[in-house]
Image (cartoon, grey):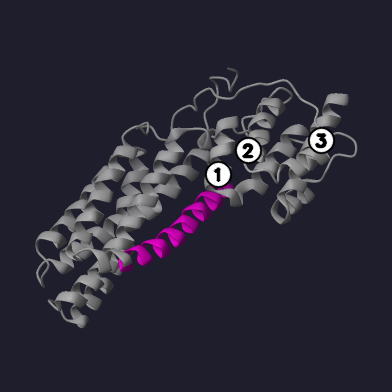
Amino acid sequence: MDGKGKEATTWTWADQISSYRFWGLLIFYILTIGAYSLYNSSLVSYNYDTKELSLTMVSSSFIAGRFAYLYGFLLAWIAIRTIKHYMLYICSIMIFVGMILTFILFNYVTIFPSQIIISLAIGAISIIIPSIIAGGRRGSDMFVVSWGILTLFSFYTETGINQAGVLFGSILDTSYSFLICAAIVFLTIFFLIPVNSELFAGIPPLRGRIQPLQKREPLHVLLLCFIPFFYLYWLYHVHGEIRSINNSPKLLSPRASVWLVLFIPILFPIIMATLNDCINGDDGSQKMKDSYSTVWIVFWSFVFFPIGAAMIQSSINRSIQS
């Protein structure tokens, strides 16, 4: 396996996506946000069923939680200063304790401290995860991409969980929803344990798989992309093939490219743009005659992705001929 040399001191986007550290943090984030959304919807449903608290009290607890959420940046600052992930464990424990407290004692005394503890930890996690990812890359572009990914997952997770909360409320005793939330938070820790404690502060591991360039008809690639999973097969192989002409640190590993498109398909145009850059040299020094502009690669990959794939394959074919 060929990869980057030991002298590397920063992580590229491809390094991070090709590492479990990124995916472990992402899964941890999604499950935590999902549990938090389910907790809030369950809180409203449970109080509606039991009428134990007034609507004013519940609303006030949410307001207190929002203020605590904002102050989560203090915990995030500590986490980023130490460049270790132990603060994520602390935040998980805080959320777990707050949810269990709500499950055991749902009254005027516990509602406020539970909301404050949970929201404080959630606020910290919402800043810590994108900051950790962007910090390893040391670039504003990575922060934009990581923040965008997490924001999208937050939106879809919260929307889905709110619907699930309604379903749970019609099937189960609402009080058990708090226990389910706590169980989800407890589960997140198991995804966090394999994450290297250095996060993205250390040297990226060696990665990548080199394969010989293979000539394919661009039209065939375009048509075969309509067959389910063929484009994933093609994407896997072209990442190894392009590494044979440019072993760039920006290039994803074949396996990471497949996982990324499966779970975050909106990033497909960015992957295609990276492939095009690597074919032409990272700085354009190997740019071939009649090569495609990255702008057009991104455009067609976004509008109609089989055309973007065919354009990349056409560039590979020209590289073989040259």
Task: Indicate whether residue 144 is drawn in magenta.
Answer: yes
Residue 120 rendering spot, x and y as whole percentages: 27, 59
Q: Main secondary structure of the magenta part?
A: helix
- Residue under label 2: 232
- Residue under label 3: 315
Residue 101 rendering spot, x and y as whole percentages: 13, 59
- Residue under label 1: 262
Of callouts 3 and 1, which one flags the residue occurring earlier in the amino acid sequence? Answer: 1
In space, the residues marked 3 and 1 are separated at their CA atoms by 24 Å
Q: Secondary structure at mark 3?
A: helix
Of the 4 image quadrants, the one containing the C terminus is top right
**Which residues, given as a range, are shown in magenta?**
140-166
> Pointer 2: residues within 10 angstroms few (<14), some, or many (20+)?
some
Residue 71 rendering spot, x and y as whole percentages: 30, 61
Q: 196 above or below 229?
A: above
Labelled pair 1, 2 in contact (Cβ < 8 Å): yes
Q: 14 above or below 39?
A: above
* Residue type at tag 1: Leu
* Residue type at tag 2: Leu
* Residue type at tag 3: Ser
